[in-house]
Image: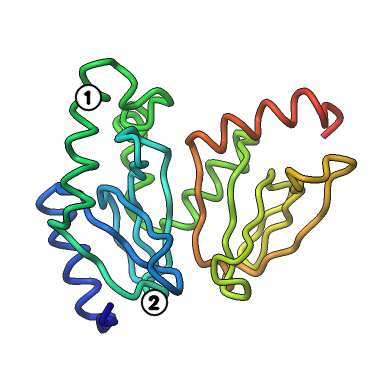
Amino acid sequence: MEKMTERMVREQLALAKQGGYLVEVHNLPGDDYFNVGFVVGIDPTFCLLISVDWDGKINGLIVIRISSIQSVIKGSDYLTTVSEKTKVAHRYHYFDIFGVQEFLDDHPEITSGNLLGNALQDAYAHQLPVVVGTQKYKGNDDFFGRIVQLDRIQLVLHYFNEHDLSSLWEYRVLLAQVDYLRFRGTQMATGQQIFKDIFPEE
């Protein structure tokens, strides 16, 4: 897949936001994994998407560093299939089971200004688990946990390993190294349950 210039990426993100259509956002090496969603916010450094999964339902929100995006695609067969699945998800009332659209309607300010800062503050203030991807690992590893400290320079995450629940681990991340942040979706709900049942002291 041909890599777009950052200017082209920004143009495609802006068009998708204005047009309200689904796009593929390729921000990790290789074609095996990419994000699908609706662009709802763009700032000088990040974009904000309503993430839609392969089952055609909203899977939370994701903030992605624009400089890490290799391409933005619209109108693919994959997107057509996902779009058809969203119709079924609407029909059977599981399109937005975590109330992401209602959250955005009630908090429109989260889609403008400093998008990463907005997402971090939301997760930190409400003690909501997040998934943090960093420039160091480029999608080969991300960290799933709860933000316990946050300032303008870095965050401290207490995270767990799904294959080793013997304890929580701590990870300090410079905000300048954050590649993407997932919040308010399936992983948030899963994380809340794990913290409640397995790490209740946290």
Query: Mark 1 — residue?
Result: 88
Label 1 crowding class (10 Å Cα cut-off): few <14, some 14-19, many 20+?
A: some
Residue 193 spot, x, y in % from top left: 68, 26
Q: Tell whether 30 sits left or right of 190.
A: left
Q: Amino acid under label 2?
A: Ser
Task: Please tell me which residue is depicted at 35% across the width and 66% down the height of the picture.
Answer: 26
Query: Mark 2 — residue?
Result: 67
Residue 4 spot, x, y in % from top left: 25, 80
Q: Tell whether 170 sits left or right of 85.
A: right
Q: Tell whether 137 sits left or right of 99.
A: right
Residue 109 spot, x, y in % from top left: 34, 44
Q: Look at the image and tell me in which quarter the C terminus lies.
A: top right
Instruction: Give the residue furthest to the right.
Output: 166
Task: Please tell me which residue is depicted at 61% across the width and 38% down the height of the picture.
Answer: 125
Task: Please tell me which residue is depicted at 31% across the width and 39% down the height of the picture.
Answer: 108
Task: Please tell me which residue is depicted at 57% across the width and 42% down the height of the picture.
Answer: 123
The image quarter in which residue 191 lies: top right
Q: Is residue 179 above or below residue 147?
A: below
